Image (cartoon, helix red, strand yellow):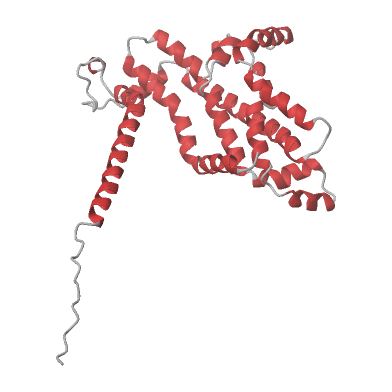
Amino acid sequence: MALTRPQVQVRPLRTGGPRPRLGGALLGRLLALAALIGLSLLILYPALWMVSTSLKQDAQVLEYPPRWIPNPVVWGNYAKAWASAPFTRYAINSLLYALSVSFGTVLSCSLAAYGFAKLRFPGRDFLFLVLLSTMMIPGLVTMVPQYVLFSKLGWINTYLPLIVPSFFAGAFFTFLLRQYFLGIPNELLEAARVDGANELWIWARVVLPLATPALATVAIFTFDGTWNDYVNPLLYLNDERLYPLQVGLATFRSANDTQWQLLMAASVLVLLPVVVIFFVFQKYFIEGASLTGSVKG
């Protein structure tokens, strides 16, 4: 009996199987990347035009089509714009204003958030709901009563009506810090209480060091909002020597409305500190924003 070799069926190799999937994924990533780049350019268009215009000569500002890369590059526009108005004084006023409000906001909101998150007292939840409900009140509604109050106190044309309210905790940042403080283990606080620490010591030496990202987030948001604030300083300040940069820039615009290159150079200088601060502290900002959204409510 003759032996026959078993017949083995050889399957053809799949030479084109995975490739369509890889090609589809790569195409999807390229399309997503192109969409993100296009959206980024669309968002950055005003900023790019501002920087480009700040480096042009006067005759090149209104050219059509616009020239994005100036030739020649006029760096002297920045020095000329800075010397055309008392921007040094405006910058000092803005820095003092923004730092004071940031300090007051972080201090008052962290104290209030610690009370709502870690202390037990009658009516705590009701008071917290009342605080949250104040976020529904538009700022324009309270503008006139606040102005009358500060006028009665004799605070008009001073920085008191701009700085003092920051030492009374605002609703949004108190809510944000409370959410973060809820994620801190209560065992750490109980251990400190057993050792004889009071609540103020626990807030300063235990809670705040653990909440550095959230505090940095509050400080950055507050500094950015205060630095760019235009309405409140314009409402309460009448003396030009007290103007911050935003009000000073508006005054500079009315005096140099036809010199766009100087106006854009001054705008870049006003915007630059906020951009630098964001990039220096972006690690804390991103960490605080992500952790605050993940803790329990």
Between 119 and 206, the residue placed more toward the observer is 119
In the picture shown, does residue 206 fall above or below 137?
below
- Left or right: 63, with 139 as reference point: left
Between 157 and 5, the residue placed more toward the observer is 5
Place residue 162 in its image quadrant.
top right
State the quadrant of the N terminus: bottom left
- Point out residue 30 in the picture as x, y percentages from the top left corner: 27, 42
Residue at the image point whose x is 78% and y is 32% from the top: 124
State the quadrant of the C terminus: top right
Between 97 and 195, the residue placed more toward the observer is 195
Place residue 291 in its image quadrant.
top right
In the picture shown, does residue 202 fall above or below 42?
below
- Point out residue 163 in the picture as x, y percentages from the top left corner: 65, 22
Residue at the image point whose x is 19% and y is 81% from the top: 6
Residue at the image point whose x is 32% and y is 13% from the top: 259
- Point out residue 123 in the picture as x, y percentages from the top left corner: 81, 30
As drawn, the residue found furthest toward the front would be: 1
As drawn, the residue found furthest toward the bottom would be: 1
Between 103 and 220, the residue placed more toward the observer is 220
- Left or right: 162, with 267 as reference point: right
Q: Can residue 161 be seen? A: yes
- Point out residue 22 in the picture as x, y percentages from the top left corner: 27, 52
Q: Can residue 92 be seen? A: no
Residue at the image point whose x is 78% and y is 44% from the top: 201
